[in-house]
Amino acid sequence: MRMIRFPALGVALFAIAGGACSRSAPDAGPAPAAQVAAPAPLPAASPGDSGRPKIVALGDSLTAGYGLLEMQAYPALLQKKLDDDGYGWEVVNAGVSGDTSAAGLQRLDWALQEQNVRVLIIELGANDGLRGLPVDQMKKNLAAIIERAQTGGIAVLLAGMEAPPNYGPEYAASFRQVFRDLARQYKVIFVPFMLDKVAGISTLNQGDGIHPNIEGTHIVADTLWHALRPMVDAANAS
């Protein structure tokens, strides 16, 4: 499992824990989707590129593994599951703490610069919900990421998120529906809530009550693996 290093963009914290939503140091604001450059040709693989089929995990602090060692973040746990079961695949951690859906879209080409990317895990939206950003813009950003991946022949696993309750039930419902609508429209593999069985449970989260601890991250990895493994099997069979 490898980690793509990106410039620090700050850390935004999100969770639905005890009905509260918290945040640390302010993160860089997202650029409007209209300012995102058109896709550039993918660069050649680095000399150390393994050439193995790759899974890129594009996300925020939940993917980057905030508060954890790199080997404890869920992409590394997925790598271990792949290795233990004899899959010759590689997981690339392309998570950046503080990322919104717009920021994720901005660096998508960079995240997909690896050769032979077969699956893209999209874990974005938590910071959009934290900041109360318009759900229609989040939907456009996520749709653009999915479309770009599918155009490149990359299968997508979409990890759904929930909005914090302080913006009201209407916002929360609209936020939740974005992920369901995208999954249906683009026919992607969908995990309705990545933090299922973890969010709001103090023993499964770090001291901030927000980010999963080691035990919680193992549950997150199990949730994603249940959806990811059939995708890997299908890709191997094709």
Image (spheres, rainbow, N blue to C red):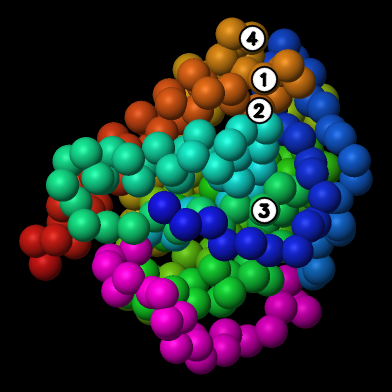
Q: Please give left or right for residue 118 compared with residue 61 in the image.
A: left
Instruction: Name the residue carrying label 1.
Output: 206
- The residue type indicated by label 4 comes to Ser
| Marked residue nearer the N-terminal end (1 or 2) | 1
Instruction: Measure the C-alpha gap from mark 1 to mark 2.
Output: 6 Å
Instruction: Measure the C-alpha gap from mark 4 to mark 3.
Output: 24 Å
The secondary element bearing badge 1 is classed as loop
State the residue at coordinates (53%, 23%): 214
* Magenta span: 33-54
Cβ atoms at labels 3 and 1 below 8 Å apart: no
Crowding near pointer 2: few (<14 within 10 Å), some, many (20+)? many
The secondary element bearing badge 2 is classed as loop
Please identify the quarter of the rendering in which residue 45 is found: bottom left
Crowding near pointer 3: few (<14 within 10 Å), some, many (20+)? many
Instruction: Name the residue carrying label 4.
Output: 202
Cβ atoms at labels 4 and 1 below 8 Å apart: no
In the orientation shown, which residue stands out farthest toward the front?
48
Q: Any mark on residue 96, and which?
A: 3
